[in-house]
Image: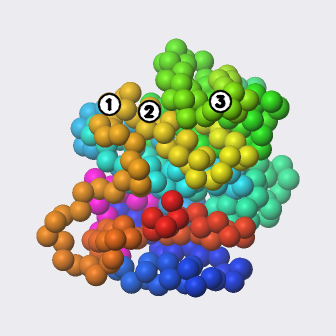
Amino acid sequence: MTRLKGNLVSTSIPWSPRRLFIAAMLAAVSVGPAYAGETQGLLAEGTRWQTPYYVIDSNKPGPTVMIVGGVHGNEVAGAKAAEIIRHWVIVRGKLLVVPRANAPALLADKRCDPNEPTETRDLNRNFPCKGGLYKPRGAAAEALWQLTERTKPDWLVDLHEGIDFRKTSKSTGGSIIGTNSEEVVRIAKIMLDAVNATIDNPKQKHVMLMGPARGSLARAAWERLQAKAIILETCRKDPLDVRVRQHELMVHLLLTNLKMIDQPVPARPLRRNIPSDDSTTNAPRALGWRPASIPPPAFVVCRSGHILLCESEEFW
Ligand SMILES: [Zn+2]
């Protein structure tokens, strides 16, 4: 198991008392071994794209599902949702989560890493595809693609956002972009029904689209690995907590249909069972902190002030 090397904190903006409190609380919780069913690793270790990934293995036969967030840095709902999802308890199969696939872009609060050359700037156009790239382009895409190939996911779900609602614009906000598979279409319809049941305005209801863009991770996973691949696109005109919740709801439906999860979608980030005799922590349970035997997450404060990763319930 590779240990995380510490918290990633942007110091480019002033820290409010609230952020300082959170940082102090994180520092107060000592790092210990990970949850027994979880392994952690670092993608693109030692580079500016270094970012953690998490493998939650039920140790029971079942599908492998890969969830990716933060491929585009200004689409923070996916990164936040993935960070929540990685804490879910699964009862069969394996879950691999990469919450922040494009760490420099998330820190910059931009779609793409501003320091990346133009030809490789958009991470989600750098993956192999028929009639296009034969192999991934750029270090970030290479690292993520190698992990995807090693994982051989049955399902890959990439969490994104659009700037406007698809029903009234050309943006992909409020859509599910599927690949050519009966099972993908079946699950996407279940997701659409569920998410649209929470939306009153007919112009803001989510719709189904087909065919992820060439060079996207979802398209590569579908074409090269025969994964059932799907992109979930929330709309940035909705409040952030709504968008995070929509991602959660849709991923939860997939995992429920695959019988990988047997609990309702949690009202709060669901934490794994904590041994009742754990006495190694003074962490305030009222705030939902993990005990000392489970490491605290890294957290990132991007330039717009979003705290991307923080387990305090205050932020959800
Ligand atoms: Zn995107």
Q: Are marks 3 and 2 in contact (CB under 8 Å)?
A: no
Q: Residue at x 40, y 42 (%)?
A: 265
Q: Are marks 1 and 2 in contact (CB under 8 Å)?
A: no
x and y percentages locating residue 240 in the rendered image: 63, 53
The answer to whether the residue bearing label 1 lies less than 8 angstroms from the nearest atom of ligand 1 is: no
Q: What mark, if any, has residue 206 been given in the picture? A: 3
228 sits to left or right of 169: left
Instruction: Give the residue type at disc 3.
Output: His
Q: Which residue is mark 2?
A: 253
Q: CA distance from mark 1 to mark 2?
A: 10 Å
Q: What mark, if any, has residue 225 been given in the picture? A: none
Q: Residue at x 75, y 35 (%)?
A: 165
Mark 3 against mark 2, which lies toward the viewer?
3
Disc 1 packing (10 Å; few <14; some 14–19; many ≥20): some
Q: Which residue is mark 1?
A: 259
Q: Quadrant of the N terminus?
A: bottom left
65 sits to left or right of 228: left
